[in-house]
Image (tube, grey):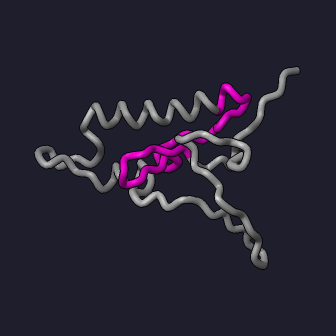
Amino acid sequence: MMLTSKHPNLVRELATFIDCNFMWIVMNILDAGSLADVMTQLKDPVTKQKGINDEVLIATIIKETMKALSYFHTNGKVHRDIKAGNILLDMQGNVYLSDFGVSASLKKG
C-alpha cells in the first residue's frame, strides 16, 4: 500500500529489503514521533493535564490527516486503523498517516 500511494501526508517507502527472516522498510525519519507520543509528553502548565490544548494545532493535525484519508478514499482504498499512534509528525510540523498493515483496496462489484 505504501509503494502505490503517493501523497504529501502519507509515509513514503524509500526502500524495502529482506535480511534473514526480517523484512525492513526504509522511510524518512519522523523525528517528533507519533501523535500519541506527543500527547503523552505535552502537559498544560496550569492544569498539569497531559495532551494538546491548542485548538488550532488540533485542527491542523486533523486537517492534514483528513487530506491523506481523502486521497486514500479517492483512490478506492481504506486505511481501517486511524489512531494517534498511526499519525506521525516531524519537527517541521508536517503530519503523516502511517501503518497501512490492515488497509484494503475497494473494488466495484
Q: Is residue 21 magenta?
A: no
Q: Residue at x 46, y 35 (%)?
A: 64
Q: Residue at x 40, y 37 (%)?
A: 61
* Segment tinted magenta in the rendering: 72-97
The percent position of residue 1, horizontal first and vertical second, equals 72, 46
Q: Position of residue 74 (x, y in %)?
A: 67, 25
Residue 37 picture location, percent across and down = 39, 55
Residue 9 place in picture, x, y as percent: 53, 41
108 over 71 or under it: above or below: above
Q: Taking 96 as reference, is 24 left or right?
A: right
Q: Residue at x 74, y 38 (%)?
A: 104
The residue furthest bottom is 20
Return the residue found at the far top. 109
- Residue 56 lies left or right of residue 109; in this view the side is left
Residue 77 appears in which quarter of the rendering? top right
- Residue located 43% across and 33% down the image: 62
